Amino acid sequence: MPISFQCRRCKGPPLPQEWEGSCPNCGGFYRANRVHVREGEIDGSEIQPLKEGEPISAHDLMANFQGDDSMEKRPTGMAGIDHVFDGGLPFFGAILLCAFEGSGKTSFLWELFMALARKKVDTMYISSEQSEKHLARQLARCGEAPAKHMTVLSQNDRDSIMRALGKQAPKVVAIDSLHEIEGITDEDGYSMASGSDRAVTRVAKEVRRLADELEFLVFLVGHMNNDGSMAGSAHLRHAVDATLTLQYKTDDKDPHRILCFEKKTRFGTPGRRALFVMRKDGFKDLGPYEDDDEAQEPETIIPRRNRDAN
């Protein structure tokens, strides 16, 4: 019987000679066992390929994604964010980011995107509310940005946003905010009222599907009502992979903010929190937060009347 070489992990079809690189059967790193095989015989079983809409064993499902970079995390270099996300941002999915008006959602995203751009991660910030001039002013207050890896778009039309995402192929996206997007239609092509619960949920589902298909992570900015509840129905929260909130530490006069997942998350450990503060040089990450932690650097805090209202 001739000697052949077989992948140790998947035990797929033996090869007549040693192989370098990824296994042609399972895609994982190829480490061969020498095996004796009769003519035409396959020792072991092939991994079932993934077919959309078809059931697959749990073993084969994991094998199909073994070695896939998208299963890993992307560290941001910001201690608080990496703590909340268990080591870094996921490579794709949809996150609903909710906070009160004026709590710093935009400033938080600017800081995050600049940190990612410094790591040469392509990001795209889409504003459905502000013009290019207002965005330029905000960006200037944050300091010099690594422009090569940051893209900014002022657009509130659903179709235009989808085309831009497909064309630019960013890795991390923010859409600020969902409630201002227009041009949304239902399954029958009828227009839906911008900002309505149904319209917001529908566009969130569409963006999430695109994020999964093109493998990017998207932050979908939402709002909180005066009573502390999230704007939008429960269907909106079910349409995303996680709900992230940016909350006041004490009240709206306190420049400190607490970042944490609110109930649903597929990306981190519930209960982990990070502390941020509004300072003269921007919205700064102070790292992991516990209730007895003391706020840092109070002398650098921006007075409320001068703070960024976004």
Image (cartoon, helix red, strand yellow):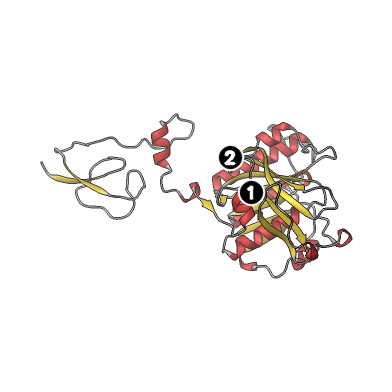
Q: Quarter of the image containing the C terminus?
A: bottom right
| Dot label at residue 110 | none
Q: Residue at x 64, y 68 (%)?
A: 146
Query: Earlier along the polypeptide chain: callout 1 or callout 2?
Result: 1
Residue that protrudes farthest toward the right in the picture:
305
Residue that protrudes farthest toward the left in the picture:
1
Do callouts 1 and 2 mark residues in contact (Cβ within 8 Å)?
no
Q: Is residue 251 visible?
A: yes
Q: Is residue 272 left or right of residue 98?
A: left
Nearer to us of marks 1 and 2 is 2
Q: Which amino acid type is marked by label 2?
A: Arg
Between 179 and 165, the one nearer to me in the picture: 179
Coordinates of residue 135 in the picture (x, y in percent): 77, 61
Q: Which amino acid type is marked by label 1?
A: Val
Coordinates of residue 21 in the picture (x, y in percent): 32, 54
Q: Residue at x 79, y 36 (%)?
A: 229
For disc 2, the marked residue is 266
The local secondary structure at tag 1 comes to strand
Q: CA distance from mark 1 to mark 2?
A: 14 Å
Residue that protrudes farthest toward the front in the picture:
292
Q: Residue at x 24, y 48 (%)?
A: 32
Q: Residue at x 68, y 32 (%)?
A: 187
The local secondary structure at tag 2 comes to loop
Between 281 and 286, the one nearer to me in the picture: 286
Q: How many marks?
A: 2
Coordinates of residue 75 in the picture (x, y in percent): 56, 56
Coordinates of residue 85 in the picture (x, y in percent): 59, 48
For disc 1, the marked residue is 218
Q: Is residue 56 left or right of residue 252?
A: left
Q: Quarter of the image containing the N terminus?
A: top left
